[in-house]
Structures are given as structure tokens and as C-alpha cells.
Amino acid sequence: MIAPACKHDQVKKHGHDRDGNQRFRCTLCGKTWIQCKPQGQLGPMRLPIKTAKLVLQLLLEGSSIRSTERITRVHRDTICKLIVRFGDACQNFLDMRMKNLTLTHLQFDEQWTYVAKKQARLTTTERENCYDIGDIYLWTCVDRKTKLMPSFLIGKRSADNARRFVKDVASRLVLPNAHSSDNHAYQAKDYEITVQVSTDGFAAYPEAVDLAFGPYVKYGTIIKDYKNASMIYTPSEMVGTQRTGRRGIDKGQEWTICTSHIERLNGTQRLFLKRLNRLTLCFSKKLRNLEAAFAMFAAYYNYCWRTRKPGKSGKKRPTAAMMAKLTDHLWGFDEFFDAVLRPATQS
């Protein structure tokens, strides 16, 4: 409540402000003040919780913003504000939960998209000064066993972003204590390997992996060779692979280097995030919205999404969070919604 400017006790109601808060007025001196309503899970947004959940579920199941607007009768500007509000909460939720992880084989990849307009449409000035438009890459990683996505980064395809992303992933893992695990003068040379990392042939990865993990990692790169790769909008045929063990992978063990799971996750992302669909009119107009939308997808994928087992059985695995021992049960969307926004209600 905004404290009144007077000390009189003769007060009457004086309408509401544009946000629906009750206004009061002193009948003696004419001073007015506002009594603010307590904010709910969505903060200052006055959208009903039931409607907000429906909007978010539609967006996470591949609907576009305008399609969601037609179904729910919620204005597209309100939907965008909801995406940013819930996406920021999802990012904070992941930062709190994705800690002290024990993962076995991480696969890294970058997925292309664009914001506002494609790189070829940028002016010379925009190319020099603007980091938030043009070609943008989704830096993601996934654990081969649990299918957990511990972190992501959205930005340009640069060596700096490669270092930032890999270091962020490494900071979320349980790494060995340097003194207890490293070789000493009276011991044979050996290091405690904690995780294996597989990447594509992007030149910035070897330095980034060495900087983030040091000697406690098995690392290899894989380059896939395609046939008819230059034909636009046609599926290319993979005709071979070049696997190279960079650290800790002996000769004969190169077959363990793999990025197929993260590339499959790229397909899931393009399918269930409408702004990533190719050959459509959908794209992100602001980098801020893309970051929030992808954070929303990443949290939903880790805690609610169930991948299918290999083969034709159609059986589903537990969620990635369950397989990584971050939770002991399957989350529904209502529980996910409440868990993401709980810090906002307690603060």
C-alpha cells in the first residue's frame, strides 16, 4: 500500500487505477493514494491461471502465437508477455535444479535459426553493431543415457560462445577433486575420467572442452559426410563418418563418439517450437522472446517430456529428470507450472 500523504482518518474509496488497484481519498485534505493488490503467480499480469496454462501448453505442443491467439482469445501481445514471464522463471528454475549432476556422455551441437531477418538481409551497419538479429544458433547438449539437457546458450556461432557454453555445462557436473584424483610423484600417471564429450568438427570445441574439463574427460569429434548435400530442401544421404579421438579415446574406441542423440533432439525442438519450424512464416522477432521460449521448452523437456525407447515397441522412457535422479515421479503440467513459479510466490 502506498502510504497517504495526510494523517486524517476520514477516508473514502476513490475508484481504481488502470491496474485495478483500489484508490482512496481523504475527505478533509483531498489527498489520494493506492492500495496495491497482492500479486499472484504471474506477477502483475491479470490473465487467469487456467487460461495461462492453456496458452503455455499450446505453445509447448507446437502451436504458433497467432494460432494460440485464435484458440484462446488471448491477445498476441499478452501471449508474448506471458512467454517472457514464464520463460524467465524457467531459466531460474533450471539454474537452481541443474547442479551437481552425474552424467556419462555429453553430446554438443549448434542449431541454426534467425531473429528478425536472415543474415543475408542485414545491412553493413547491422552486421557490425547488432548481435541480436540475423543468424542465431541454439547451443545445446544432451546426455546420451539420461537424455537430460543440462544447459543451453543462444547466440552467435563464435569461439567465445563455445567457451562460455562448455564451461557452463562443466560447472553443473560433479568433477573430481584435483588433489585426490591427480597423479602424484609416487603414483602412476592417471586422472579420474568423469564424462565423455562428443562434438562435431567446429574448430572452437577442442579449446573449449580442454578449458572447461581439463584432463578429466574423454573427448572426440565426428564429421559426417553426406551425398547430395548441396541440393536445397532435399534430405541428404549420409555416406560416411570421420571419428577422431582427441583425448582419452584409444584406437579402436572411436565407435563411442556419437552426436546422433543431440541431432535427434534438434528435430524435436524444431517440431515443438513453432518459431523454429523451417519453410514456414514463423520466426522470432526479438532475441529476448527466443531465449524465453527456448528456456520454457528446455524445462518442459527435462521434467515432462518422455522419449520413446528404440525399436517398434512404442514404449516410453521415464522423463530425463527422473533418469538423472532429479525427481522420483512423472510431472504433469500443473505441477511443473507451480514448481517453476513457486519462487516468485514466495519472494
Image (cartoon, rainbow, N blue to C red):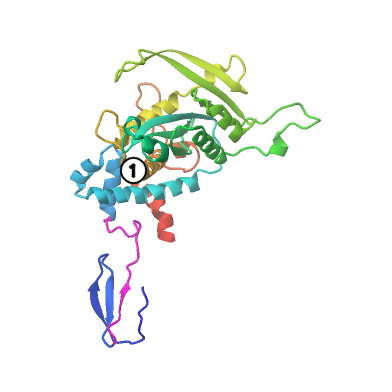
Residue 325, horizontal then vertical, whole percent = 50, 40
Instruction: Quickly name the residue at label 1.
Output: 286
Residue 308 in view, yes or no: no
Query: Where's the C terminus, which quadrant?
Result: bottom left
Left or right placement of residue 40 versus residue 243 in this view: left
41 magenta-colored: yes
The image shows residue 137 at horizontal and vertical percentages of: 41, 33
Query: What is the three-letter code of the residue carrying label 1?
Result: Lys
In terms of depth relative to the viewer, which is nearer, 141 or 340? 141
Q: Is residue 192 above or below residue 81?
A: above
Few, some or many residues within 10 Å of mark 1 (<14, 14–19, 20+): few
Displayed quadrant of residue 239:
top left
The one nearer the camera, 322 or 201, is: 201
Please state the horizontal and vertical placement of residue 281, each as a whole percent of the image.
24, 34
Q: Residue at x 19, y 49 (%)?
A: 73
- Look at the image and tell me in which quarter the N terminus lies: bottom left
Which of the pair 64/115 is nearer the observer? 115
Q: Main secondary structure of the magenta part?
A: loop
Q: Which residues are magenta?
A: 29-48
Tell me if residue 137 is in the magenta stretch: no
At a point 53% along the width and 44% down the height, the residue shown is 99
Query: Exactly how many numbered labels are in the figure?
Result: 1
Residue positioned 62% across, 23% down in the render: 248
